[in-house]
Amino acid sequence: MGISEDATHQLQAVTTFPELAALVKRLVRAQGKTLRELEKSTGVSRATFSSVLNSKRPPSHTVMSGLVAALEVPAADRPLWMEAWGRLTAAADGGANAEDAHRVAQQLQEALDAERRRYQETVQDIAARQHRLAQALSAIDDRAAARDLHRLTYELCRQYLGLHNRHTLSALDGLTFVLDKNREHDLSVVTLHTALEELGSLASGDPIGLAVRAMLGRTLFDRGDLVAARTHQEQIYEQRRRDLGGKHPDTQRALQALIRTVHEQRDIATARALQQRLEGSPPDQPSN
């Protein structure tokens, strides 16, 4: 059960603990919870909850976090309640005790970080399940459904986890792979260019940026734009070789992609030299 926009504004505007208690009591009534149920679900005594709800004492961090959990406040809304509690607690100190104020701020930050981690773990779990389902749809050749599910998964991960998360990268790879299989190359290129723009300067040498550029090289190859694909793949291979060494698996994969493109261009001499490099033997020397 989320909170209304009006309640959000009220949380942001509360200036006293009685005002906060009134909002909590409204949520208790909306949930139909009893003090006994709150005690059972949190381990905090009914007497403590009664004192807090009747404004006889301010809630501690434990009581406040227990209340928002017991009242089934969604994870995305809980920081609003804890922020209001932290603001009032800091104001109650009046700034006279800097150490207590710092402790309150640290507790609030820890609570927010914990909520954020739980939320990210939930998103990652959803993304992993959706990715497996999309792969199953691809396996039965339902490419339209697989594409839509991959896109939904990618947007979910991009929004809540960011582009530097492995689940986001996996979702982007799955989406563009299906788009390429569906011959929707232009849409795949736009999606990848948008990701690279979001990465900004990191797109050139950052491992995530290189991975996205490798996907773009694959898409350009599938579209038949071999010149552009080769340019990307040459740059990726050289960057991998400098950063990781020639024997690293990522470097080898980059070289294999480049060889495939060069061979498709019928540049047989260069393809042979690159293949010899891949196999670890020196390239042929020109004859005198």
Image: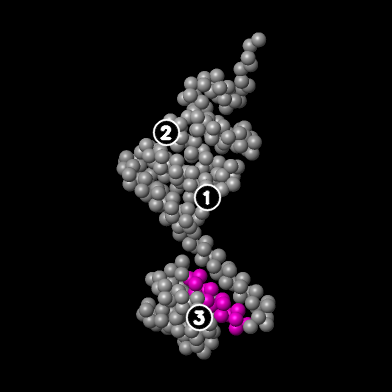
Q: Is residue 218 magenta?
A: no
Q: In this view, does 36 lie above or below 180?
A: below
Tell me what residue is drawn at x 43 percent, y 53 percent.
155
Residue type at mark 1?
Glu
- Which residue in the structure is indicated by mark 2? 223
**Residue at image location 52% in from the left, 76% down from the top:** 84
- The spot of residue 211 in percent (x, y) is 53, 42
* Spot occupied by residue 212 in the image (x, y as percentages of width and height): 51, 42
In the picture, residue 29 is in which quadrant? bottom left
| Residue toward you, 7 or 24 | 7
Query: With respect to residue 134, does 33 lie above or below?
Result: below
Residue 205: horizontal and vertical position, in percent? Answer: 60, 42
- Of residues 149 and 222, the one nearer the viewer is 222
Q: Give the range drawn in magenta.
A: 78-93
Per the picture, the main secondary structure of the magenta-coloured stretch is helix
Please identify the quadrant where the C terminus is shown.
Answer: top right
**Residue in the picture at 60% in, 83% down:** 92
Kindly report the distance in space between the C-alpha atoms of the residues bearing marks 1 and 2. 23 Å
Sequence-wise, which precedes: disc 2 or disc 3? 3
Q: Dot 2: within a 10 Å radius of its alpha carbon, few (fewer than 14), some, or many (20 or more) residues? A: some
Which of the numbered marks, if any, corresponds to residue 109?
none
> At numbered mark 2, what does the secondary structure look like: helix, strand or loop?
helix
Q: Mark 3 points at which residue?
A: 14
Residue on which the image places disc 1: 198
Looking at the image, is mark 1 or mark 2 earlier in the sequence?
Answer: 1
| Rendered position, 118 above or below 152 | below
